[in-house]
Amino acid sequence: MSDLQDVINLRRTLHRYPELSKQEFETSKRISEFMQQFDPDEEISVAGTGKMFVFEGKEPGETIFFRCELDALPIQEHSPNLAYRSSIDGVSHLCGHDGHMAIIAYLGKLISENRPQKGKVVLLFQPAEETYLGAKDMVKSPEFHALSPDYMFALHNIPGVSKNKILVKEGSFAAASCGITINLEGRTSHAAEPEKGNPPYPAGTKIIEEIQELTRTKKGFKSHVISTLIYIRMGEISFGISPSSLEMGITLRAYENKDLNLLCKKAEEIIEKHAHDFALEFSHSYSEIYPATENAPVCVQMITEAAKSNGLDVDQMENPNNWSEDFAYYTATNKGAQFGFGSGEDIPPLHNPNYDFPDDLIEPAANVFFQIYKNRLM
């Protein structure tokens, strides 16, 4: 049976051959082949490329899920001296999902050597976390519902935090967010006669400024809110035409779901006001909608106890993370919690072209999950 070095080698192989969201076919196959040595009672394909490995006790009891992610990012890696650097141009594991998979794989080894006495433990390798909201597909699937989890757990490595330090928070752990796409339509004219047209740019700049002012002052919001301009598209490279169409995307974030709903409502009012003021047609749509990840207190307590049993430091977070996580779709209807796992103060940040998951996190992180499992099912 595989030892820790085999799991490290798996992690590095996954790093070398990354796949984007909903394209994780080879990744899923590699995971399936590796996990079979641990003799799970059942392997279930779910939500496209997703996999669930079930270990079942002889007595009835709770069902506990431990989740990781299969997908990589559409970013070019800049680590020329890394022996196992990405072999796929423009695609790389710069968020640590290769490491998260390795942690759950090592957990599979530990469970296979200490099988549950009661209940079930499910190791979930989820597709499409970075985009397409893979967790949303998971919770809609009959395969997921058939297993009916009592508790769900996940971690995320956190660069900039001392290695192996555990970060926990009850309630909102990761921010709610969504992307709003705004379209403005005016009237084209000759560039020599701009007064005969109605360009959308003046209204667009006012919309951007007012939405950003809204999140800067935070007036009327319970907690932290953020707006980030992502892109603007307007016109063509044709110096004789004053354009009529503008499209822009803004990401809206909030620590609390109610605040995100309010931020969206206020943004819509700003769009409508300026579109009317400038006599423009307008529309808006939403995408990549992430609720806040809400951690159940009972699950946070389980994580804290498991971490301390393994001699790890535990820090209570004052505020949620600014980033969002589709794990929120699990915690919306199931008791669960996600926690941070410090990956080192000198590690490049997530999504940085030079980031690489530290292999020495695999064993201690898996041991925290394993302790949760032992405390409940053995």
Image (cartoon, rainbow, N blue to C red):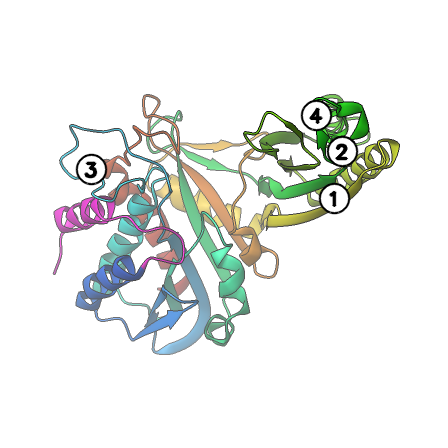
Q: Is residue 163 magenta?
A: no
Marker disc for residue 267: none
On the image, the x and y values in percent for residue 223 come to: 71, 32
> Label 3: which residue?
85
Residue under the point 82% across and 31% down: 220
| Label 2 – label 3 distance at C-alpha | 44 Å
Residue under the point 78% across and 31% down: 198
Label whose residue precedes the other's in the sequence (3 or 1): 3
Label whose residue precedes the other's in the sequence (2 or 1): 2
CB under 8 Å between callouts 2 and 1?
A: yes
Residue under the point 24% across and 53% down: 106
> Label 1: which residue?
258
| Label 4 – label 3 distance at C-alpha | 38 Å
| Label 3 – label 1 distance at C-alpha | 42 Å
Q: Say what secondary structure mark 1 lies in.
A: helix
Q: Nearer the viewer, residue 242 or 312?
A: 242
State which quadrant residue 332 falls in: bottom right
> Label 4: which residue?
212
Residue under the point 87% across and 31% down: 277
Q: Which residues are magenta?
A: 1-24
> Label 2: which residue?
222
